[in-house]
Image (cartoon, rainbow, N blue to C red):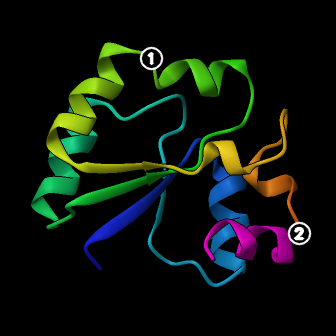
Amino acid sequence: MGYVIVVESPKDFIFMTKCGIKNVVATLGLGIRINQENILIDMGIHSIKFLLDNDLAGLDYYKTCRFKRTSDLFNTEILTTKLPFQKDPDQLTEVELAKIFS
């Protein structure tokens, strides 16, 4: 696998898996905590693709020390900005979701 897609909510996770995306995890809130980082490291994950909600809280997360720590440990890619503003991943159609990863 090598990389994982990080979303915020269980609804986002369920939608992504229904669309056939299996390497997705939900943080149940903004960002990744240290124990979650350790689990990903133990799983051999080297890269994280962030697809947080495209709202002010989701966008502000990328300015935090917690995101900096995560990006020091992993190769990171921010996909959030590919979402329409104020949209969550689970509000997309399958076609819109596919465009984010193409």
Classify 10 Å Cα crowding around label 2: few (below 14), some (14-19), many (20 and above). Answer: few
Q: Residue at x 69, y 38 (%)?
A: 53
- The prevailing secondary structure element of the residues shown in magenta is helix
Asked which secondary structure carries label 2, the reply is loop
Q: Is residue 13 left or right of residue 3?
A: right
Q: Marks 1 and 2, Cα distance to the nearest angstrom?
A: 28 Å
- When the figure is inspected, residue 72 is found, relative to residue 95, above or below; the finding is above
Asked whether disc 1 touches disc 2, contact meaning CB atoms under 8 Å apart, the reply is no
Which residue type does callout 1 highlight?
Lys
Q: Nearer the viewer, residue 72 or 53?
A: 72
How many numbered marks have been drawn onto this rendered protein structure? 2
Q: Position of residue 76 (x, y in %)?
A: 34, 48
- Three-letter code, disc 2: Thr
Q: With respect to residue 33, does 97 lie above or below? A: below
Q: Earlier in the sequence, mark 1 or mark 2?
A: 1
Q: Position of residue 9 (x, y in %)?
A: 64, 44
Please name the residue shown 39% across and 15% down the image: 64
The residue at 83%/35% (across/down) is 85
Of the pair 5 and 34, the residue shown nearer to us: 5
Can residue 93 be found in the magenta stretch? no
Dot 1, how many residues are within 10 Å of its Cα: few (below 14), some (14-19), or many (20+)? few
Residue corresponding to mark 1: 63
- Which contiguous range is marked in magenta? 94-102
Q: Residue 54 appears at what percent x and percent y?
A: 72, 35
Query: Which disc, if any, is residue 93?
Result: 2
Residue drawn at point x = 47 percent, y = 26 percent: 62
Report whether 61 appears left or right of 42.
right
SS at badge 1: loop
